[in-house]
Image (cartoon, rainbow, N blue to C red):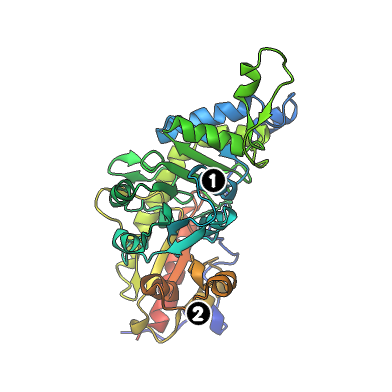
Amino acid sequence: MSATPTKLETLAIHGGTPVRETLLPYGRQSLDDEDIQAAVDVLKSDWLTTGPKVGEFEERFAAWVGTKHAVSFSSGTAALHASAFAAGLKSGDEAITTPMTFCATANCVLYQDATPVFADVSADTLNLDPREVSKKVSSRTKAVIAVDYAGHPADLIALRELAEQHGLVLIEDACHALGAEHLGKRVGGIADMAVFSLHPVKHLTTGEGGMVTTNDAKLTETLRRFRNHGISSEARQRQASGQWFYEMVLLGFNYRLTDIACALGISQLKKLEANLARRRAIAARYTRAFRELSAVIAPAVREGMEPAWHLYPIRLTLDALSAGRGEVFRALRAENLGVNVHYIPVHKHQYYRERFGYQGGEYPVAEDAYERLISLPMFHAMTDQDLNDVIAAVSKVVNFFSR
Ligand SMILES: *Cc1c(COP(=O)(O)O)cnc(C)c1O
């Protein structure tokens, strides 16, 4: 029995009252007074960059993730570039990666003058499908770069085996997945190197920032040199003859993270556990609510995996709706939900199309998902009211367009 539509039930896009008065973003940081004070304390100290906070942050980060080493960078993208360098990627080499990611994952291969080769994703998690990866391995392949899409760990066991079998370096772009658990173990030490971003929409922020975690001492040394112009920091100690001595041993960059940022990171790290718990509670609540909506497919979680929920991407069953993704998206925006789409598959970007001649249709699973994806707001500072608003707005819009 359906009642006469009230003003509230009329979609905002059709002139009705939006579910929310103000826009709820898809992600945002939360900083408390302790975080702010930590940064201020550094501003009043002797070191603004490369002081005591850098090493302290790296040690704490490594301990939290459960790896021997962590090397900080000025961004996640810089960290990806460094890991591509440390993996030995160079002109003529190939690295296999996923199209369902932010373009930086593939761009880091291009920075090394190597070629990114995409492999399609698994339909459930939208993570690299190891069977598709194995089809793309050639004599030029040197690395695999997996992404933990939305915070769900990639198929790391299968990818590890594949990498070992073919002598490849496994890099994990874990920018979505700080705190995600793979068979009871936090991601960061399973691949040869794992890359994290400390951008404000991620789990922990330093403004801009990135980190690579690894258990390999040699890779750690290369990563440290690469972020500091290629200068060997050990040379000074080796050379007893003069304190001024240093040596540049490879072509690096200035990709250093400041002490100001690292102090913020140390402070943010203390809240990470609680923030992850909040994200998991939000995801559980969404998933329960969307069971009622047959046109909405909630993100899949595989057995033994505990995602970190950077994103909460739903997929629409378009056959069950009288509108396409674009119209549903616009209707949700009109209700003041800051929905987004993650991702336009990388090979569909103009630069990749023009440089590599992609026509579309090469990666059908990723491309089909892209047509149906909508990321809902997901960040640890969301209130219960925010959460209820999202569920109400999605239900309102999806019910309206349901056939
Ligand atoms: C955020 C992100 C990056 C880039 O990180 P920045 O810190 O913004 O440079 C790379 N890969 C993925 C999957 C990301 O989500």
Please tell me which of labels 1 and 2 falls first in the chain.
Answer: 1
**Residue 61 in sight in this render:** no
What amino acid does circle 2 point to? Answer: Gly
Mark sitting on residue 279: none
**Residue 9 in sight in this render:** yes
Rate crowding at label 2 as few (under 14), some (14 to 19) or many (20 or more) other CA atoms within 10 Å: few
Q: Which of the image's four quarters has the N terminus?
A: bottom left
Nearer the observer, 14 or 327: 327
Mark sitting on residue 85: 1
What amino acid does circle 1 point to? Answer: Phe
Nearer the observer, 157 or 371: 157
Relative to 157, does residue 219 appear above or below in the rendering?
above
The image position of residue 370, as x and y in percent, is 44, 72
The image position of residue 41, as x and y in percent, is 69, 28
Q: Residue at x 40, y 70 (%)?
A: 366
Q: Where is mark 2, residue-wise?
A: 326
The image position of residue 282, as x and y in percent, is 41, 54
Nearer the observer, 358 or 389: 358
Q: Residue at x 45, y 65 (%)?
A: 99
Q: Residue at x 45, y 56 (%)?
A: 95
Q: Most extreme residue toward the top, as rendered?
A: 240
For discs 1 and 2, the disc positioned in front in the rendered view: 1
Instruction: Tell me how far mark 1 sits from mark 2, CA to CA.
Output: 39 Å
Q: Could you say whether the residue bearing mark 2 is in a helix, strand or loop?
A: helix
The image position of residue 394, as x and y in percent, is 43, 71
Rate crowding at label 1 as few (under 14), some (14 to 19) or many (20 or more) other CA atoms within 10 Å: many
